[in-house]
Amino acid sequence: MIKNKSSESKTLQGSIAIAETICSLEPGVIGAYPITPQTHIVEHLAKLTEEGLLKGKYIIADSEFSAASILFGAAAAGVRSYSASSSQGLLLMTEVIFNMAGTRLPGVFSAVNRSLSPPINIQVDHQDSMTLRDSGVIQLYVENIQEAVDTHIQIYKVAEDPEVLLPAMVCMDGWIISHAYEPVTLWQKELVQDFVGTFDPPYKVDPLKPLTYGALADDDKITEFKCMTDQALRKSADKITETAEQFRDLFGNYYGGLVEKYKTEDAEIVFVAMGSIVATLKVAIDMLRKKGRKVGLLKIRSFRPFPVNAIKEVLRETNLAIVIDRSFSNSAGGILGTEIKASLYGSNKPFVINYIAGIGGREIYPQTAFDMLKEADEMLEKGKIPSEAIFYNLNMQMMGG
Amino acid sequence: MKLNIGGITEAGLSKNNLTGSWRYHFPTINPELCNTCGLCELFCPDSCVHETKNTITVKEEYCKGCGICAKECHRNAITMIPEGEKQND
């Protein structure tokens, strides 16, 4: 394990730590739309470019669509690339991200999670990145700044793997991870680059050897093409697990591969969540354990690829899963909750209660988990577990009800 | 047939796709008005209008009959004639 002297620990803001990490990975191209919704990640990368610390081409785009298209072009030319966005900006990238996944071009995006308009709200929830879930993009959700730093390094290795070749996204909660300060270790450039390796795609845009990108495929082949993207995303699951383990062996930090199990071994009730609330829930779990409650936590680190087997393995051993969603599909319930229920189809256990909470930055405290648990206890006692998702702590009066 | 990942394939394959069958109207050029300025060639989205030896020719097997060449011609030298009404038919 390398706890190298030249790798430095500092107290840094999340966005700055990410920009410094990206700088150490030396992407050849950065596509940046610098205006809201954006964080100071790309601002700091601009500064590093100006200071000559970042040698890559920093291209300012006229929209997030163009910023993502710059990544498409870079990847097609065999160049490592990076961009960051949030909220509506991610939605504007959507078409390009589908295109990158279908054309099998890797590029890394930081998705700094923020609520979607309207009404305008710049706080955290997961609706923006979750809306991209069907594109073929890899999505890893992180809990704190150090995990965000380490996951950016890991995800390049996964996305650029010849068996994967897909766009990838590190989803990090707006404000709580992007703007907060935490002690964080930034790794030495040589170590990081050695770990990630070089990007060597099977095809490259070359005027002397022209190729067709974006060809037509009729109904006789299109299902097969789409299925190949699906297979690549499934394949990335092994790579995410392996890469996380290799990272642990070299750098000493480990956050789980696809999921992290926190005190789930003997747990009767397991909370399921993603992002920064995982850290809050760990505190809540510890407090509940002290009171003798057999509770645990399943952190979903990889939402895409979706870790069906890991979910089954943990949750089938418990009586109740409380899934906390920071996004939802209108009229269908929490997105994570819906998929967890689908992956448990056919098994008698556990019951699943799906809460939609923490929308638009509405705070989730340890007390929130205690209150949810209390409600769940009552539901279990009455034997009435609602099949539909519950909007947590709704103010019915505001809605005129 | 094994598919290449990402649908990336050899260049120039669109030549195999004869899009002329899509056409309802064919661009007919009046040589008395045409000064072979080449605007039609420039604007043709399928690169099937060509200027050679001071005459404009249209590749019938690819022209979809979109009419952009006729619209762009400053001398109104191109008329879109419905298929079946061409003079040489």
Image: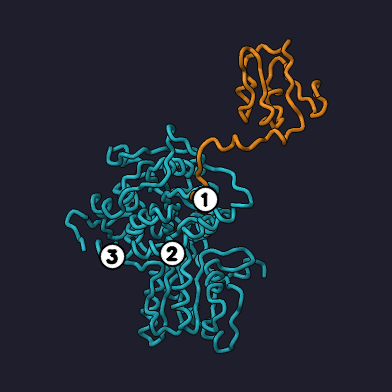
Q: What number is the disc on residue A302?
A: 2
Q: Chain of mark 3?
A: A
Query: Which mark is first along the chain, 3 or 2?
Result: 3
Q: Which residue is mark 1?
A: B3
Q: Secondary structure at mark 1?
A: loop
Q: Are there few (<14), some (14-19), or many (20+) residues within 10 Å of tag 3?
A: some
Q: Are labels 1 and 3 on one chain?
A: no
Cα separation, mark 1 vs mark 3, equals 37 Å
Residue depicted at 31% across the width and 53% down the height: A196
Relative to B38, A360 lies left or right: left
Residue A139 lies, in percent from the top left, at 45, 59
Cα separation, mark 2 vs mark 1, equals 29 Å
The part of the image, by quadrant, that contains residue B35 is top right
Q: Are marks 1 and 3 in contact (CB under 8 Å)?
A: no
The quarter in which the C terminus of chain A is drawn is bottom right
Residue type at tag 1: Leu
Foreground residue among B62 and A76:
B62
Foreground residue among B64 and A85:
B64
Residue A339 lies, in percent from the top left, at 54, 69
Foreground residue among A218 and B35:
A218
Q: Nearer the viewer, mark 1 or mark 3?
A: 1
